[in-house]
Image (cartoon, grey):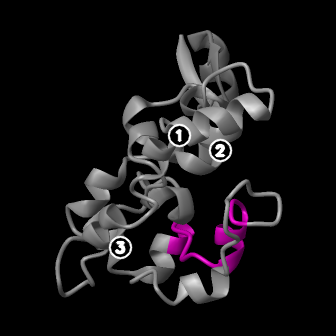
C-alpha cells in the first residue's frame, strides 16, 4: 500500500494500482519539511535571520492562539463541534498543515503555527542548498516567493480577528 497526496487529502492505494498509474509521472511529490528544517539555513544574519524573525512573530504562535479561552469561545460561537485547536476551519489559517490542506495532519506541522511552507509552499523539492541558490530553479521546484495574495488567504474581511490587518503595511514588516 502507498499513501499518495492529492490536494486536500491522502489516499491509500494498493501497490499494483500505484505502479500502473503513477510510475511514469513527471509530477514531483510535494512534501512539507517543517520550519525547523528551513531554519537550518535561514537563521544566518547574512540571510536576514528569517527563522528567528518568524519564530518571534505572530505566525510562530498562531497555533498556540487556538488553545486560548478566547479561541475556544470563538469556536463554540461559530458552532464548531471540535475545539479550535482541532477544527479544520481554524487550522486552515493557524497551522502549516491546515494551510497546505493536509487532512492527515503532521503534529509538528500543526504545532509550528503558520510556518515557512504556509506561504512558500512545501519545501522538499526546493530546500536543497544547490536549488535554493538558483532562484528560478527553486521556483520551478515549487518555491512560492510570496505575495500579498498569500497573506489575504487568511487576513481578509471574513477573518474573525478582533482588529483588521492592513496586509500592505504588515508586508513591509515581515523581515524577509
* Residue 152 falls inside the magenta stretch: yes
- Height in image: 90 above or below 165? above
Q: Residue at x 72, y 19 (%)?
A: 81
- In front of the other: 129 or 162: 162
- In front of the other: 54 or 163: 163
Q: Residue at x 60, y 32 (%)?
A: 72
Is there any visible trace of residue 30 in the rendered image?
no
**Local crowd size for mark 1, using a 10 Å CA cut-off: few (<14), some (14–19), many (≥20):** many
Give the residues drawn in magenta, as a range: 139-155
Q: Residue at x 41, y 53 (%)?
A: 61
Circle 3 SS class = helix
Is there any visible trace of residue 37 in the rendered image?
yes
N-term-proximal mark, 1 vs 2: 1
Circle 2 SS class = helix
N-term-proximal mark, 2 vs 3: 2
Instruction: Determine which residue is flagged by label 3.
Output: 132
Q: Indicate the position of residue 71 as horizontal and vertical percent values.
A: 59, 40
Quadrant hosting residue 154: bottom right
Instruction: Determine which residue is flagged by label 1.
Output: 66
**Local crowd size for mark 3, using a 10 Å CA cut-off: few (<14), some (14–19), many (≥20):** some
Classify residue 35 as left or right of residue 68.
left
Classify residue 147 as left or right of residue 41.
right
Classify residue 19 as left or right of residue 127.
right
Q: Tell me how far mark 1 sits from mark 2, CA to CA.
A: 12 Å
Mark 1 vs mark 3: in front: 1
N-term-proximal mark, 1 vs 3: 1
Instruction: Determine which residue is flagged by label 2.
Output: 92
Q: Indicate the position of residue 59 as horizontal and vertical percent values.
A: 46, 60
Amino acid at each position: 500500500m502507498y499513501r499518495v497526496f492529492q490536494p486536500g487529502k491522502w489516499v491509500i492505494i494498493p501497490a499494483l494500482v500505484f505502479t500502473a498509474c503513477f510510475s511514469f509521472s513527471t509530477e514531483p511529490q510535494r512534501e512539507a519539511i517543517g520550519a525547523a528544517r528551513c531554519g537550518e539555513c535561514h537563521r544566518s544574519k547574512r540571510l536576514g535571520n528569517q527563522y528567528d524573525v518568524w519564530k518571534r512573530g505572530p505566525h510562530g504562535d498562531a497555533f498556540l492562539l487556538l488553545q486560548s479561552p478566547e479561541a475556544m469561545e470563538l469556536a463554540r460561537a461559530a458552532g464548531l463541534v471540535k475545539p479550535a485547536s482541532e477544527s479544520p476551519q481554524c487550522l486552515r489559517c493557524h497551522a502549516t498543515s491546515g494551510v497546505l490542506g493536509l487532512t492527515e495532519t503532521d503534529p509538528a506541522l500543526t504545532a509550528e503555527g503558520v510556518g515557512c511552507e504556509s506561504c512558500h509552499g512545501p519545501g522538499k523539492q526546493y530546500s536543497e542548498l544547490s536549488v535554493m541558490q538558483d532562484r528560478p530553479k527553486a521556483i520551478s521546484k515549487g518555491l512560492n516567493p510570496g505575495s500579498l495574495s498569500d497573506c489575504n488567504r487568511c487576513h481578509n474581511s471574513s477573518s474573525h480577528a478582533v482588529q483588521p490587518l492592513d496586509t500592505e503595511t504588515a508586508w513591509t514588516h515581515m523581515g524577509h
